[in-house]
Structure formats: C-alpha cells, structure tokens
C-alpha cells in the first residue's frame, strides 16, 4: 500500500494502534523465547524463509532456488506452507503437481511443479511437519513464510528484503507495512536483498528469466519473439510493478498493465477481455497455475529464477551443510 511508504496524517492517526500491535507482538515473542508459551521442536532442522514486512518480497523464487541447491547436493528436503489463498479446509494436506491451486494455494503448487519437492500445507505448521515426516524420510524442512510463527522452533532464519521499498515508513501495522521492526533482523541468519541497492550485510538475489511458456500448451518461446508483438501484462502478486518493470526492461512494449490482489482466483470471463486476439497476455508463473484449465492460445507466463553470486551461495549454504554434516565444496 502506498500509504505505508510515506508518513502522512493517516500514519500518525494510526500510530496508537501500531504501538499496541508492537507491544502485543513483542510480549508474545518474549513469552515464546522464555518458554512461557509452548513451542514445537521438529525432529529435523527447520529453515524459515520469511520477512518482516507485508507484501511480496520474493520468497517463492528463493525457496525454489534453495530447494534446487539442496537437491543437487543429495539432501532430502521438504517444504511446509500455510497454503494461503486456498479454499480447502482439509489439513494437513500433501500438495502434488496436479493439485488445484484454488484448493491448496498458488505458491505451494508452483513450488511443487518447479521442484517436485515433498510439500504439505496447514495453518498448523506442526501438523504439516508430522505429515511430511510420516510420509517421507527428510533431512531438512523449509518453512515458506512463518518468521513470526513462534510456535515453531527453528534452526535457521532467512529474511527477504525488498531492496526498492525497504521498510517503508518504518511503522508496524496498521500505520506501516512492518510485522516487526528492523531491529529484529539482527538475530536472523541471513538477509536476502531482492532488487534495489544491496547493503553490506545482505546477499544480493537477482531475478532473471530466459523464455516465456504458453499457459495452454506449455511450449517455450523466446522472449525476443514475443517482445516484437503487442503485449498486455497482468500480475496478481504482492508487488505487481516489479513484474511489469522487469518486462519493460526486457524490451516488451506493453499496451496495458493489470494489477490484481495477491493470491486472487481467476476466471476465463475475467481475463479474456484483457487482451485482444492479436495481443499476447503475459502473466507470472504464480498466476498461470490458476489459469491452465481455461487458458487461451495467446496466454504466456514468464518463469522467474533466483540467482546468487558464488560467494553468497557458499555463505548461505555453508551453515546448513555444516548442520547436516556435509562438506561445503
């Protein structure tokens, strides 16, 4: 939200509520840290990928990158997710590549389709972990989001920061977009900067793409080929402008950009009018998992890959491999 990026009259009017939010959340975290409130310790190490701010910071590409890196090293990894945006009430539940994004959430389906990783969803993280460990033999479990879910003990905390928006106006909810103050970052294991200017204590994550994929046929097409045509873009993610700006930087001449709410469900009737038959409709991969059953021939999604420098890769993976007793080559 734009009002969370600057300080205005609305900010100060909401500041008493933000103070209340901060006091309650701080007391709650302290009670968990001091063991006055019960928390769950998993039999296998837990790594949380989260953030201190509301909105899309780029957690999903990071989770996919981390899963792939660990899989390449022979580590048996699983993922747990709240399944936000899904309509199912059946928890815990294993997610497959054929699962309905409308039922279990778009991000879990996307992660499984990209990596084949064992993944379970439930608002109760303990239930998801127990289901995964009952079904699979795992060395490590990644929690997609859940930095503030202190009922779950963790071995590693990675925080993703939007390098362009940073921490907005510096206020916690509702006057600002922060769940916790930036001082919380002093206690995490790794800070990942997505876009913008990377600070000295942060690892730079670069998001890139090599091609587009037809939503209906799954055919890969060179970006240069699509860029020569009239294109319309849509995105239902935490921060749609990031996707639109990426397409513009890749040379796409976009005739229109349509922003939707994060995790929004779509229908054919809703999306058909966005692009004419002679135009290309470009969407994120997260959107595409919800549109495959009714996609048109001119709908394409752009898969995003996260990359890190060799030094950052070793520094990020090193503590995990050490915990698992594996040499970091």
Image (cartoon, rainbow, N blue to C red):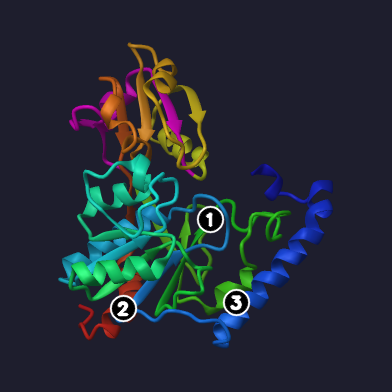
The spot of residue 294 in percent (x, y) is: 29, 24
Q: Would you name the residue on which mark 3 appears?
A: 29
**6 is higher (above) or lower (below) than 70:** above
Q: Secondary structure at mark 1?
A: loop
Q: Earlier in the sequence, mark 2 or mark 1?
A: 1
243 sits left or right of 17 in the view? left
Q: Would you name the residue on which mark 1 appears?
A: 163
Mark 1, mark 3: which one is toward the viewer?
3
Residue 113 versus residue 70: which sits nearer the camera? 113
**325 is higher (above) or lower (below) than 81:** below
Q: Residues within 10 Å of mark 1 (few under 14, many from 20)?
A: some
Mark 2, mark 1: which one is toward the viewer?
2
Q: Would you name the residue on which mark 2 appears?
A: 320
Residue 44 lies in what quarter of the image?
bottom left
> Which quarter of the figure is the N terminus placed in?
top right
Res. 308 visible in picture? no
Q: Earlier in the sequence, mark 1 or mark 3?
A: 3
The spot of residue 43 in percent (x, y) is: 30, 82
Q: CA distance from mark 2 to mark 3?
A: 25 Å
**Residue 283 marker:** none
Which stretch appears magenta? 209-237
Residue 269 lies in what quarter of the image?
top left
Q: Residues within 10 Å of mark 2 (few under 14, many from 20)?
A: some
| The magenta stretch spans residue 211 | yes
| The magenta stretch spans residue 2 | no
Q: Residues within 10 Å of mark 3 (few under 14, many from 20)?
A: some
């Amino acid at each position: 939200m734009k009002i969370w990026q600057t300080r205005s009259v609305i900010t100060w009017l909401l500041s008493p509520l933000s103070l209340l939010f901060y006091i309650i959340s701080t007391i709650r975290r302290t009670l968990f840290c001091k063991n006055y409130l019960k928390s769950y310790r998993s039999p296998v190490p837990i790594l949380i990928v989260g953030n201190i701010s509301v909105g899309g910071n780029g957690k999903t590409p990071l989770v996919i990158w981390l899963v792939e890196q660990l899989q390449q090293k022979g580590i048996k990894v699983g993922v747990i997710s709240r399944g936000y945006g899904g309509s199912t009430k059946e928890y815990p539940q294993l997610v497959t590549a054929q699962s309905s994004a409308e039922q279990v959430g778009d991000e879990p389906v996307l992660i499984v389709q990209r990596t084949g990783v064992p993944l379970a969803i439930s608002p109760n993280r303990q239930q998801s972990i127990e289901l995964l460990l009952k079904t699979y033999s795992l060395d490590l479990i990644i929690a997609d989001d859940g930095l503030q879910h202190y009922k779950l003990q963790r071995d590693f905390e990675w925080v993703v920061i939007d390098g362009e928006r940073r921490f907005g106006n510096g206020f916690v909810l509702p006057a600002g977009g922060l769940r916790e103050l930036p001082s919380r970052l002093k206690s995490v294991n790794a800070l990942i900067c997505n876009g913008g200017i990377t600070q000295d204590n942060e690892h730079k994550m670069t998001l890139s793409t090599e091609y587009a994929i037809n939503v209906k046929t799954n055919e890969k097409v060179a970006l240069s080929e699509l860029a020569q045509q009239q294109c319309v873009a849509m995105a239902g993610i935490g921060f749609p402008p990031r996707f639109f700006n990426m397409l513009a930087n890749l040379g796409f001449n976009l005739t229109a950009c349509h922003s939707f709410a994060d995790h929004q469900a779509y229908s054919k009737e809703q999306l058909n009018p966005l692009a004419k038959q002679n135009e290309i409709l470009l969407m994120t991969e997260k959107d595409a998992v919800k549109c495959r059953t009714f996609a048109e021939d001119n709908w394409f999604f752009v898969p995003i890959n996260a990359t890190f420098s060799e030094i950052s890769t070793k520094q990020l993976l090193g503590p995990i491999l050490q915990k698992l007793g594996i040499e970091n080559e």
